[in-house]
Amino acid sequence: MLSESLLQSLRLLRLSAPRKRAGSYTGERRSTRRGRSVEFADYRNYTPGDDPRRVDWNIYARLERPYIRLFEDEEDLTVHLLLDDSPSMFWQAEEGAGLAQKWLCAAQLAAALGYVALASGDRVVVETSRGQRFGPRRGAASAALLITFIERLSLEPRHRPRAALNAWLARCARDARPGLAILISDMLDEEGASEGIAALASKGLTVNLLHTLSPDELAPSLAGDLQLKDVETGSAQDVSLDAGVLAAYHRQLSTWRAQLATEVQRFGGRYVLVNTALPPEAIVLRDLRREGWLT
Amino acid sequence: MDVLNPLAFWFALLAIPIVLLYLLRLQRREQLVSSTLLWRRAALDREANALWQRLQRNLLLFLQLATLAFLIFALARPYINAPDAASQQIVVLLDTSASMQATDVRPSRFEAARAQVSALIEALGAGDRMTLIAVDEAPRALVTLTNDKPQLRDTLRALRPTLGAANWSAAIALAKAIGSGDRETTTFVVSDGAGAADLTLLPGPVRFIPVGESSDNLAITTLALRRTRDGLAALVRLTNHGLRDEEALVVVEAEAALIDARTLAVAAGKSTEWTVSDIPPDARWVRARIDKARYNLLAADDAAYAVNGSNITRRALLITRGNLFLEQALAALPNLRVARATTPPTNAERYDLYVLDNMSATLPAGANALLIGAQGVFTPVAIFSDTAYARVAPHPIARDLDWRTVSVRDAYRLAAPDWLQPVVEGQGGPLVLAGESPDGALGRLVVLSFDLRRSDLPLQIAFPILIANSVAWLAPPGGLDIPLSVRPGAVVALPAGARVTLPSGEAITTGAQGFAQTDQLGIYTFEAGQAQGAFAVNFANIAESRIAPNPDLALSRPNLLPAAEARAAQREFWHALAALALALLVAEWWVYQRGLPALGRRSSARRPA
């Protein structure tokens, strides 16, 4: 699924951690990387029940009031890979044998990002819109399992009842742990995904969106009087294609993308549009690094 | 507008298959897409701001339906009721009489009438045929039964109003003759109605198109010259044909020299007379004209001309044993110098006229003579006394002659030649004969076949009239029997080769038919051999001077249609519709082949396989 050279490159990368949020990390949890937990973060008033070892005695001597020293939580990062496998992800303009390029690209991206997370010791959870779940797992040893899981997703029956984006994301948010969520989807849903994104954010997840669109969606090469049929809902739309309609399509596409980016960025997330015709190496090593997703 | 073939509208059902085919052709290809989300939004976006583009999409359908509509409409043969058009054959009687020169309608009545006829010509349909008759003194068909519009236009353009009166009865006869074909004929009468005659004689529907508005006109209706002791006196009569009192400055000139000028007041519908004396007796002609007047719409009758015939003297020789009645009657005649003799003349002196009162004499060759009684030139063969119930034949010497009260006791039957025609004929034989010798042995002769003393004729009023008529006929002034005044268009019996100078100064030599170019008003002078003289052409037409239009002429006849309620012809215009349909078809083909700019990409996909 991923070439050896790509895996080599990925081993050197880490996922950028989400930004810190005040009050989120109290240091109560046991750190797995003990030696690194010395970074001072903040003070707060002592409340009964606090560990007396954490009182800053120097401050107490100066101010005669007890303050607790807060340290940066060094707990490992949980990376939620939310992979959309709705029928629209398997769509391709020309019906043909084999898997749709769009899905392949999305799956490869999920595998690559999962590999990066596992290799850098983060905890990885994969959830698909049709309810398949992987993890949480940690450690490079789980990489083979992850790739096998993603590969087997392609074999699932294509036309299962689709789940609305909002419902899926809300379900993911239910048992999510704070951390990073990477949503890989074409976002083609009438109702949008703003509620789902908000649900994830409320659980302390930073939602990054990899918006995967095929070239046929970015620049349709359709012509004539057509009845367009939605591969998911089956709804039809009559379109007589001419320059005017295409211009309107492009107008609506950019409006929609801007809208999605705004929704994600509202909660501190990031938005990257992926043309699924590009090879995954280019997307991961060039685009995502340039956008600061990988360091 | 109506249609001749309403059944053609059933073809409108053809629109159904066209629309059906169009809808079938529009059935869309199904295309699976990942989502219709964006397409739906794009479609909404586009429909919101581009209603026109939706129309444009159906342009081909619209063009096809429009073509069909025009074709069906053409098949239905629609027509409009063309105003001012007539039935298939029309006869136009255009008044060209003098009153049409009146200027109450600008520029003149005739121009207004010409415009009306021009409109009729332009309204002629493809199958219509028009006859154009100019109605003047001698009505004539200028163009007969033609559809040739240029010819009609040219004829109409060349037409001019005349100075004569309109001879309506001749025009109606002409129109009847032309309109008596098998097709129905509509007659248009374009006239001011002044002097128009009985239009009831015209066959078929008649439409009267009136022109003219006003009756204001002044005319010099009389100019007469009379010899007085002091010289010449002229009688001028100014007539006001209008409806308001008027005054006019009238000028009298003798051979271009001003004699007198006076402002004459004349009441509406009345005449004023003015006698001008002190005209030089040797003046050859006199003119009276209206110099200035406010309401005077016809110019042709503003001047009158009179030739002075008083200085033309004729000489007569009366051979008689004494007849006081005859001597008195002859002496009363103007311009006649009478010599009296008791014996036939022996000298070679020639007289214009010889009067033989019951005397026999040998007359010189070509002599004109009045022979009275049995002793003249012809031998009496019998005497008859059945002289009552005389019949008077029309002849110049019988003009105004009332023979009813004349009694003749007895008369001679004479051995008269055939060229002597009886003018007054009693039961027993002719009483008065007249004729002109054809061989030139004698001139003109008037013969009274009875002795005046055996009749009461000298006591009757008929006597001076007969004598005056006879002398005028036997010895006309100037030696030629030329009237002093004629009407425009009249033929003057000048001998061939006479040289005539027109009022315009142009000189014309007459032919064998006499002189007929009397279409200018004024004085004409002529020289014919030794004789020379002048005559005047005067308007002198009271009927035409009365220019009051008669727009109510229409009411004098039941089937005389007013112009506005004309029976209109049906003008079909399916040719234009068919041409439009063809143009639309070409446009449809062009759009189909080339596409409109915005249709550029679609046109290839739309073309059915």
Image (tube, coloured by chain):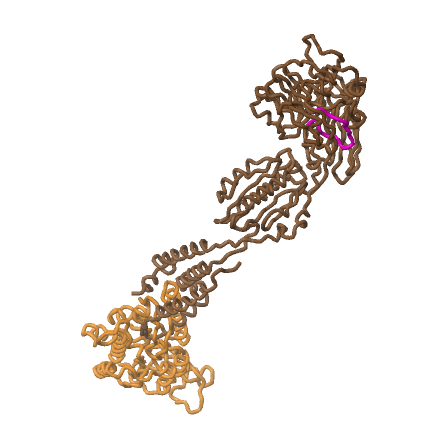
Chain colours: A orange, B brown
From this view, report whether residue A253 is shown above or below residue B143.
below
Residue A253, image x, y percentages: 38, 69
- Is residue B403 within the magenta segment? yes
Residue B404, image x, y percentages: 76, 33
From this view, report whether residue A49 is shown above or below residue A180.
below
Residue B331 location, quadrant: top right
Residue A265 relative to residue B454: left or right: left
Residue A162, image x, y percentages: 33, 83
Residue B338 can be seen in this image: yes
Q: Which residues are magenta?
A: B396-412
Q: Quadrant of the N terminus of chain A?
A: bottom left
Direction front: furthest residue: B382
Question: Residue, x 77% and y 24% (percent of image)?
Answer: B234
Direction left: furthest residue: A4
Residue B13 location, quadrant: bottom left
Residue B547 relative to residue B565: left or right: right
- Is residue A283 within the magenta segment? no
Q: How many marks?
A: 0
Residue B250 or residue A138, whichever sits in front? B250
Residue A11, image x, y percentages: 23, 75
Residue B608 or residue B569, whichever sits in front? B569
Residue A182 can be seen in this image: no
Direction bottom: furthest residue: A49
